[in-house]
Image: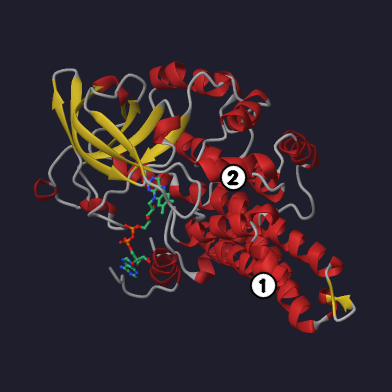
């Protein structure tokens, strides 16, 4: 259905959005956990390309990673906005939310489309931290943004599916017990629509090494624990198929709005951290016998970023409110992600510039956050694909791909 500007305005009219610091106690609780993980911790992990196991444990013990799991399954059953705030506050505290974010947005597929047995089997153990659901296997080397052309095959053989193919950029696969895996169960040339014939599975990774799964780390610009995963005859029990065979892409797309909103909020957190660091430095750093922040060339970019972050934050709140109201929030979620990823990148650039040479020194953490901030315009969805969504679904322009 065409989501016109007029329709969006009409839908938004009846949804309330909280202004100011919503969920103050939750924010404070996240900040308290983060205070135990100072910059030196993240710097060391960055150096070693390590995974923040202790941080994830602390978040799990505090119940933060189970925020979106219903109470019946051991979580706190909070709305999406609460999850967004957790991620925002983690990054605003100088920690790195991406190590934990997938669990929040992958969860939706299991929550909405999993069978009661699957939910009972997995959710309480995810809530308790016994199982980590942090890996999301969609991207492939050849398919790129064109998800429907992915070629990893899952063939039904008795009570199992046998998986063969390759995923790339599967972040945290070495630190996750479960991977939400999208694979083709019917060849593309045998389905009516290219969106059909893909299925989604909960792949259990422990013990899979040498049994049809090989995971290789990819060293990247930032410490994201990303990997490539090779499947060669990996057997997944049919009981781990989520929903109906062939409908997997629909289930994944269903979770995209939540993903966009959560990641956008994470961006806002990083942007705030970067801006605060830059403002503090601009106040303190004396050059030509006055603070550098007295120069308009230094303060105007920072003022502009404050405005950009406020706008992005409002779009995050609005998209989350529409999501909670059960309204179609596709356009809002995409706009939130677009604005937040760009505001954060601008904050990163301005922070580097404000710190001058010291921005390049690792001990100030600005260069690390600058590297981390760059990812949001590429993953989990690239800016062009968001613009294509807005052009097509909001402005009604012809589909461009
Ligand atoms: C660090 C990192 C972590 C990641 N983690 C995960 C993960 O956990 N799980 C997972 O499944 N994936 C993950 N990804 C993959 C990520 O989602 C993709 O990189 C992203 O979706 C873009 O796909 P691509 O890299 O294949 O780029 P391509 O699709 O090859 O696109 C390259 C460029 O061309 C542009 N482009 C392509 N088609 C069009 C078009 N029709 N119109 C306009 N522009 C176009 C894109 O916007 C992009 O700028 C990760 C990537 C990185 C770098």
What is the C-alpha distance between the residues marked 1 and 2? 39 Å
Residue drawn 53% across the image and 70% down it: 6
The local crowd at label 1, few if under 14, some if 14 to 19, many if 20 or more residues have their Cα within 10 Å, is some
Dot 2: element: helix
Dot 1: element: helix
**Mark 1 vs 2, N-terminal side:** 2
Residue drawn 48% across the image and 22% down it: 131
Where does label 1 land, which residue? 353
In the image as oriented, which residue stretches furthest toward the left?
A: 190
In the image as oriented, which residue stretches furthest toward the right?
A: 289
Q: Is residue 206 left or right of residue 244?
A: right
> Which residue is nearer to you in this view: 341 or 274?
274
Q: Is residue 391 left or right of residue 274?
A: left
Residue 387 image point, x, y percent: 43, 69
Q: From what the image shows, is residue 42 above or below residue 115?
A: below
Asked if residue 98 can be seen in this view, the reply is: no
Residue 110 image point, x, y percent: 42, 31
Where does label 2 land, which residue? 324
């Amino acid at each position: 259905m065409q989501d016109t500007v007029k329709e969006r305005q009409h839908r938004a009219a009846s949804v309330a959005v909280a202004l100011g610091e919503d969920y103050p106690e939750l924010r404070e609780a996240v900040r308290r956990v983060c205070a135990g993980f100072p910059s030196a911790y993240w710097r060391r992990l960055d150096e070693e390309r390590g995974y923040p196991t202790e941080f994830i444990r602390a978040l799990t013990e505090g119940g933060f990673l189970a925020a979106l799991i219903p109470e019946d399954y051991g979580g706190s059953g909070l709305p999406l906005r609460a999850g967004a705030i957790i991620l925002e506050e983690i990054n605003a505290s100088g920690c790195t939310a991406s190590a934990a974010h997938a669990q929040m947005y992958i969860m939706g597929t299991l929550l909405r489309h999993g069978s009661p047995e699957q939910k009972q089997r997995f959710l309480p153990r995810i809530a308790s931290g016994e199982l980590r659901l942090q890996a999301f296997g969609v991207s492939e080397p050849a398919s790129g943004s064109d998800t429907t052309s992915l070629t990893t095959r899952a063939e039904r053989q008795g009570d199992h599916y046998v998986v063969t193919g390759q995923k790339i950029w599967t972040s945290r696969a070495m630190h996750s017990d479960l991977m939400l895996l999208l694979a083709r169960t019917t060849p593309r040339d045998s389905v009516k629509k290219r969106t059909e014939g893909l299925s989604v599975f909960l792949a259990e990774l422990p013990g899979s090494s040498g049994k049809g799964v090989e995971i290789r780390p990819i060293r990247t610009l930032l410490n994201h624990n990303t990997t490539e995963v090779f499947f060669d005859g990996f057997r997944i029990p049919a009981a781990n198929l989520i929903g109906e065979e062939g409908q997997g892409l629909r289930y994944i797309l269903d979770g995209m709005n939540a993903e966009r909103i959560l990641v956008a909020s994470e961006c806002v957190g990083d942007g705030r951290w970067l801006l605060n660091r830059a403002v503090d430095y601009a106040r303190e750093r004396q050059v030509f016998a006055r603070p550098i922040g007295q120069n308009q060339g230094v303060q105007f970019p920072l003022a502009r970023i404050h405005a950009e972050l406020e706008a992005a934050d409002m779009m995050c709140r609005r998209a989350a409110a529409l999501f909670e109201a059960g309204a179609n929030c596709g356009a809002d979620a995409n706009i939130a992600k677009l604005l937040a990823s760009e505001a954060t990148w601008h904050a990163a650039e301005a922070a580097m510039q404000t710190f001058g040479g010291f921005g390049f020194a690792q001990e100030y953490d600005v260069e690390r956050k600058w590297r981390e901030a760059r990812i949001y315009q590429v993953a989990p969805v690239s800016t062009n694909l968001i613009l294509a969504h807005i052009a097509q679904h909001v402005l009604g322009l012809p589909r461009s791909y």
